[in-house]
Image: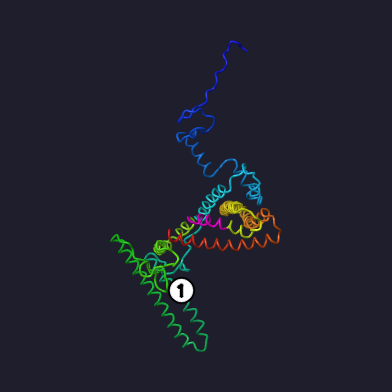
């Protein structure tokens, strides 16, 4: 060791760029300004954004496996105070809901959505959007009528009173043919008015086949509006504006039903987010004698919904894999079908076991309460899906 060597100079801590105080961490202990600012590599900035919003780090790997395979484990760990290793319940719910609805929309894009129809028959004249389509559907309907007439005539001719029956049948068939032609003519006339309005840069008239009835009369925002007595005037005005928008959207959705699906899925996450606290309230009511805080039930609800979203993600991935295997590796179709079948059954089994382990009641009471809560929440979800469909129709 060289005795003449000078000792190393002490390292001066970096100073806060705002107030000049020496720093001893990532934030100034005097003014609170963070060391990291916006002027830095984009990868570092996006990493911080992902960590702030989604909390995506190594904890996600410690969280997803027990979330899917160990019913109630994460909830009991959270109640016991062991929370550092796992993603927080709300961030877990948010992260999985975003991925789940994204994958569901991707899966829905692979379906033949144009098979959906509002009229219950893809050949309905009222759903035609072009004159050529009206004529084709009219001719097809008349051809089916003639075909039915020939079959019915062959059956009637074998009866003793064939002459009278044939005359009655011809009269009914003539009425049906007249009704079909009349409907086609009305549809052609409406489409001509639409073309004329577009030619003059005017708004097209409302579709008469898309009219919404209220109190036995066609709905109208001014002459026959929908009014709910306990709602304020501004809310009724917004409601009728949504109805008018929905009425105007029906022709577009008939032409492209994917618009309704997209509109519905755009609001369904918000609907489920609103329903989740109601699910926690159901748990609070059914387990009122457990004397747990409402926030504890909300943690159970968050973990339950997070598991449901994770199941939806895995089911969507497995379905996409099976669709791929059907054309590229058919031998995988059957195993993937069994996996999907097992995933569907694991969903209610998991939720039942989670309720049993978290609330620690006997099998009988857990079964009864699980069934009652399931029925109540199914009704809520059904109403929520209907609400999402209505909102989707109004916003498509």
- The answer, for residue 318, to whether it is visible in the render is no
| Image vertical order of residue 187 relative to residue 63, above or below | below
| Residue 273 located within the stretch drawn in magenta | yes
Q: Nearer the viewer, residue 67 or 113?
A: 67
Frontmost residue, 350 versus 235: 235
Residue 229 lies, in percent from the top left, at 44, 67
Residue plotted at (66% across, 53% down): 358
* Quadrant into which the C terminus falls: bottom left
Q: Residue furthest left?
A: 200
Q: What stretch is highlighted in magenta?
A: 266-278
Q: Does residue 302 sit above or below 85 in this rendering?
A: below
Q: Position of residue 361 (x, y in %)?
A: 70, 57
Q: Main secondary structure of the magenta part?
A: helix
Which of 296 and 248 lies nearest the eye of the viewer? 296
Q: How many marks?
A: 1
- Residue 62: x and y in percent read 63, 43
Q: Is residue 374 left or right of residue 128?
A: right
């Amino acid at each position: 060791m060289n005795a003449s060597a000078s000792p190393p100079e002490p390292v001066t801590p970096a100073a806060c760029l705002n107030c000049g105080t020496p720093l001893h961490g990532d934030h100034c202990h005097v003014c609170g300004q963070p060391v990291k600012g916006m002027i830095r590599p984009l990868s570092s900035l996006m990493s911080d954004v992902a960590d702030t919003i989604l909390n995506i780090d190594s904890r996600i790997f410690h969280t997803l496996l027990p979330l899917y395979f160990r019913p109630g484990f994460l909830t009991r760990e959270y109640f016991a105070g062991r929370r550092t290793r796992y993603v927080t319940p709300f961030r877990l719910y948010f992260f999985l809901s975003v991925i789940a609805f994204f994958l569901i929309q991707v899966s829905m894009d692979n379906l033949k959505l144009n098979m959906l129809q509002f009229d219950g028959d893809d050949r309905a004249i009222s759903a035609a959007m072009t004159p050529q389509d009206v004529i084709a559907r009219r001719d097809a309907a008349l051809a089916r009528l003639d075909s039915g007439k020939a079959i019915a005539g062959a059956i009637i001719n074998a009866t003793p009173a064939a002459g009278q029956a044939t005359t009655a049948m011809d009269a009914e068939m003539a009425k049906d043919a007249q009704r079909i032609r009349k409907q086609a003519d009305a549809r052609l006339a409406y489409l001509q008015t639409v073309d004329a309005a577009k030619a003059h840069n005017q708004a097209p008239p409302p579709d008469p086949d898309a009219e919404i009835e209220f109190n036995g009369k066609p709905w109208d925002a001014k002459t026959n509006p929908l009014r709910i007595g306990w709602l304020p005037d501004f809310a009724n005005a917004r409601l009728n504006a949504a109805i008018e928008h929905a009425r105007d959207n029906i022709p577009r959705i008939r032409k492209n039903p994917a618009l309704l699906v997209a509109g519905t899925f755009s609001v369904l996450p918000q609907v489920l987010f609103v329903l989740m606290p109601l699910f926690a309230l159901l748990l609070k009511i059914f387990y009122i004698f457990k004397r747990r805080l409402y926030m504890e039930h909300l943690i159970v609800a968050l973990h339950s919904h997070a598991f449901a979203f994770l199941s939806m993600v895995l089911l969507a991935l497995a379905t996409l894999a099976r669709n791929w295997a059907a054309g590229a590796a058919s031998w995988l179709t059957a195993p993937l079908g069994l996996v999907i079948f097992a995933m569907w059954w694991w969903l209610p089994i998991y939720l039942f076991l989670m309720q049993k382990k978290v609330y620690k009641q006997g099998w009988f009471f857990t079964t009864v309460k699980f069934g009652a809560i399931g029925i109540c929440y199914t009704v809520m979800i059904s109403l929520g899906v209907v609400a999402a469909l209505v909102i989707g129709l109004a916003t498509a």
